[in-house]
Amino acid sequence: MDSQASPTELDYHTAICWAGDDMLGNLTLEFVERVDHLSCEDELIQEFERSLNLLSVKYFALGEVAGIAVDPPIQVGNYPAEWLYEYIGGNYQIIDPVAHMALKTTRPFGWNEVEEAGLVRGRGKDVYHAGVEHGLGQGRSVPIYQANGYLAVASFCDVALDPDPKVISALELMTLYFHSRLAALRARAEGQRIRLSDRERECLHWAAAGKTDWEIGEILTISQETAHRHIENAKRKLGVKTRVQAVITALRQRELSV
Amino acid sequence: MLTAITSHNAHLFEGELDQMFRLRYKVLVEGEGWSELDSADGRERDEFDDDFTTYLIAQNPLSGAVAGCVRFTPSLRPSLSSEVFPQLFDLKSLPIGKEVYDGSRIVVDPDLKHSGSPTEIAGELYCGMFEFGIALQLRAITCVVAMKWLHYMRHWEWDIAPLGLPKKMGEESVLGLELHTTPEMLTHIRKIRSQDAPVLSWSDIGLIRANHEIMHAMMLNEQKVA
């Protein structure tokens, strides 16, 4: 590399490796400072992808690892579409060895470490190898601790097996900012939804446990008619016809929890 | 309510300070396993526990036992961030000035049994931190946090700026951070806690302010002499 070449003659990627720290730091700071000014999810994802490209990360995926997949997990990313469909449709996050590894560590890890930890076995092996077949090379994952208690994992692909730890650190920090802003934008969108009242939620909770309107009345010291009315209101708000559907929809929308 | 302790009133709180150092030992050395902080006498204290340090302590309302604590040191003196963790401030240089303090050793007793859960005490300490910053009109409080705490701070929309890229320290990733103690943040935290009342008394605010001015005048004199 000719050290006399002016920066404008080099492509951005090479400039990062060559100039090292400063470029990486600026890139990270720029993204971190920009993130809270983006109010559109698409814009946010675009900015994140742009930063990732500058670090020569080809694919990324961000998903929630729920113990029991009651809700569709937050899935965002640019993995090959067929792989994403297969993953989401098959609820692969339950058997994915990468997800298992994320549950055991608080720090970023390379996928090679997942094999070394002996986590690639059984059905997990299929997920692992299927990913490779879909064009996903070696990768790194970053566990994300969400305030709602669910773990999320961000994975990055086509990163060289032993990249500069500073690049991984930059990824870790930018991912945290990306994820938290995404969650905030989604919460804001959800906040504009119609919510169940406390009473409606309580009645639905007991209905989910198999109680009749009369039993719910006894438990909550309200009349049977009132309990019935609360559940009818809940059904109406959730846009469903039966109380079973109401329970399922409420669980999905996190109006109710098991 | 929290109690503020500086070199000016430390003589009135010798018992509480001792309990505080024991609590720090219990939580950080025994609990977290930070053996580098180990000591022979069961108390955790370091070179940043000196006459220039301000402590905020939370006490169990029934027993008076120290249930939580935090400490602040002026950035114009050597601090934990500047001396022990400078490598964690590699994105932006560590801010220094009369309006910047370094915060550390925020500790809550996990075994609280009577009135006051650890989360409540933690919330009180956060409010105390913001009231402290606002009383002194600080530009920033610098600190070192594990990534996990950064997640929570982002979730609760704290006004923060990362000052370094995360680095591995034991099993965790940690980084240097600056916290902005704005009145908006204090209102926000009070709303989250559903507690409107200040946690620092007017006399403690007075003590903190006086201590701040006296310390900085002393430091200026030291510089002139040197």
Image: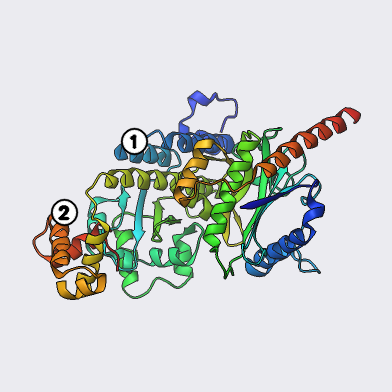
Whether residue B176 is visible:
no
Structural crowding at the residue carrying mark 2, measured as other residues with C-alpha within 10 Å and reported as few (<14), some (14–19) or many (≥20): some
Residue B124 placed where, x, y %?
57, 53
Nearest the viewer among A150 and A251 is A251
- Residue B82 seen in the figure: yes
A169, B79: nearer the viewer: B79
Horizontal and vertical percent position of residue A170: 51, 45
Do discs 2 and 1 belong to a common subunit?
yes
Across and down, in percent, residue A30 comes to 48, 34
Q: Label 1 lies in what chain? A: A
Q: Is residue A23 left or right of residue A242?
A: right
Circle 2/circle 1 CB separation < 8 Å: no
Name the side, left or right, on which A144 lies relative to A81: right
Q: Is residue A131 above or below residue A186?
A: below
In this picture, residue A88 sits left or right of residue B30: left
Amino acid type at mark 2 = Lys
Sequence-earlier tag: 2 or 1? 1
Secondary element type, mark 2: helix
The quarter in which the C terminus of chain A is drawn is bottom left
Q: How many marks?
A: 2
Q: Which element type, helix, strand or loop, lies under badge 1?
A: loop
In the picture of the structure, the residue carrying the numbered disc 2 is: A237
* Mark 1 surroundings: few (<14), some (14-19) or many (≥20) residues within 10 A: few
Residue A155: x, y in percent? 40, 54
Query: Disc 1 marks which residue?
Result: A39
Tell me which corner region of the image, top left, top right, bottom left or bottom right, holds residue A177. top left
The chain under label 2 reads A
Q: What residue is rendered at 81% in x and 69% in y?
A: B40
Q: In percent of the image, x 77 and y 50: which residue is there? A: B48
Q: Is residue B89 above or below residue B146?
A: above
